[in-house]
Image: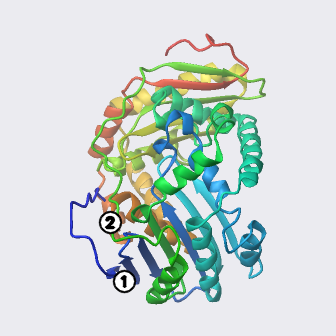
Amino acid sequence: MTANNRGPAERPARVSTRTLQDGVRLTVLPSGLRIITEAIPTTRSAALGIWVGVGSRDETPAMSGASHFLEHLLFKGTPKRTALQISAEIEAVGGETNAFTTKEFTCYYARVLDADLPLAVDVLVDAVADSILEPGDVETERGVILEEIAMHEDEPGDEVHDVFAEAIYGDHPLGRLISGTPESVTPMTRNQINNFYRKRYQAPEVIIAAAGNLDHAAVVRLVRKALAGTPLDTEPAEPAGPRPGDKRVRVRKPQTVVLHRDTEQAHIVLGTVGLSRYDDRRFALGVLNNVLGGGMSSRLFQEIREKRGLAYSVYSYASQYADSGLFGVYAGCAPGKAGEVLDLIRTELERVAESGITAEELVRGRGMAKGAYVLGLEDTGSRMSRLAKSELLYGDLMSVDELLTRVDAVTIADVGQVAADILAREQSLAVVGPFDEGAFPPG
């Protein structure tokens, strides 16, 4: 997939619909809002998602956490429904609703029986498009979010990844917490959140995706009916293209950040800047990641856990954004073993950077990538997510066969080149555990 940056075009005066793949259709409403569906007649369920191209990286420092705050508030009531009615109507038919915020987008979703998709559309569109944001609800959810932030600090295995992102990106929005901090969330007013809501939740930035036993034309009719008269029922506009990926994100010099916590384990992330989602080398990086720390047969797992028993959990991962990315290795171990584990990780990364991987590892790494992708599409929720992310992040939908072909095309040379580039870069280290700031000298 590559970015499909749509240039200036005549604003659509009417609904346009096209078929993207077998069973997959995309409709663009005059407002620029997009509806994409996949018909899966063999299922008896349907998944619906409303995806907005706004996340924590779109916030100013003073509004840090606004996207996540808004995610909480949009289920709290509309002119048509109370918070209880929003949840009760879906749960009464055995369905479920939820939402999540990332650094680059926000998603609100529901899963229901196929016969109840009309209800899900009506409830979810109402909540996302026409929320009231009552002042009392803002105060209630502020308390909930502050508790959520505190709870996150009690999970050092999660917190260390945030420390690592901040070590790389500093005060850039990609380095900030998605939830915000108590210092940003506490003073945030209802008017500030509402202004963010109405300014950023615009129809061209919204994609409504559905997958399951459904009819595309019927879903379009349901969505248009639910949107009528809401702030998302707007004048003609062109859909927003994928987030631009042609600017470089400034990163900090490699450093070590130690966050003291009285924990029983040391939590470590060692890594560096990775690849953006538009970089064609991401397929080779995916194979490399599998070989290094993607499973029980990976080098790091075998060396650190299986052979030496130094850590219960050890893995590598790659995060990708429109214009940057991260590559990191995580390990959780006894504090007294942290130095040894860190040395082993560095040694393995250096070895792969210099010598690459073997033919056997290439086959295994490609197989893991293909299997994870295909097996991850076994339910309507994941199929719905695939549709929305492809349109939102790339403006294009790569077929499963195309993606598998791209993975199969990865060669040993491709992996060796990306390893020599990324793994040889200077690395930052994040540590959460019972350590003082100077406990980990640069490697």
> In front here: 340 or 327?
327
Q: With respect to residue 99, does 196 lie above or below?
A: above
Which residue is painted at 70% across and 57% down in the image? 134
Closer to the N terminus: mark 1 or mark 2? 1
The image position of residue 310, as x and y in percent, is 67, 30
Q: Is residue 93 visible from the viewing direction of this image?
A: yes
Q: Position of residue 282 (x, y in %)?
A: 35, 48
Left-right relation of 248 to 205: left
Q: Can you identify the residue that label 1 sits on? A: 22
Kind of residue sitting beneath label 1? Asp
**Callout 1: few (<14), some (14-19), or many (20+) C-alpha neighbours within 10 Å?**
few
* Pointers 1 and 2 in contact (C-beta within 8 Å): no
Helix, strand or loop under label 1: loop
* Residue pictured at 42% horizontal, 23% vertical: 252
Task: Kindly identify which numbered label has been placed on residue 396.
Answer: 2
Q: In this view, does 271 lie to the left or right of 96?
A: left
Left or right side of 407 for 88: right
* Front label number (1 vs 2): 2
Disc 2 residue type (three-letter): Asp
How far apart marks 1 and 2 lie (CA) works out to 15 Å
Location of the N terminus (image quadrant): bottom left
In the image, 258 versus 336, the foreground residue is 258
Q: Which residue is drawn at 32% across and 50% down?
A: 278
Does 206 sit left or right of 151 as displayed? left
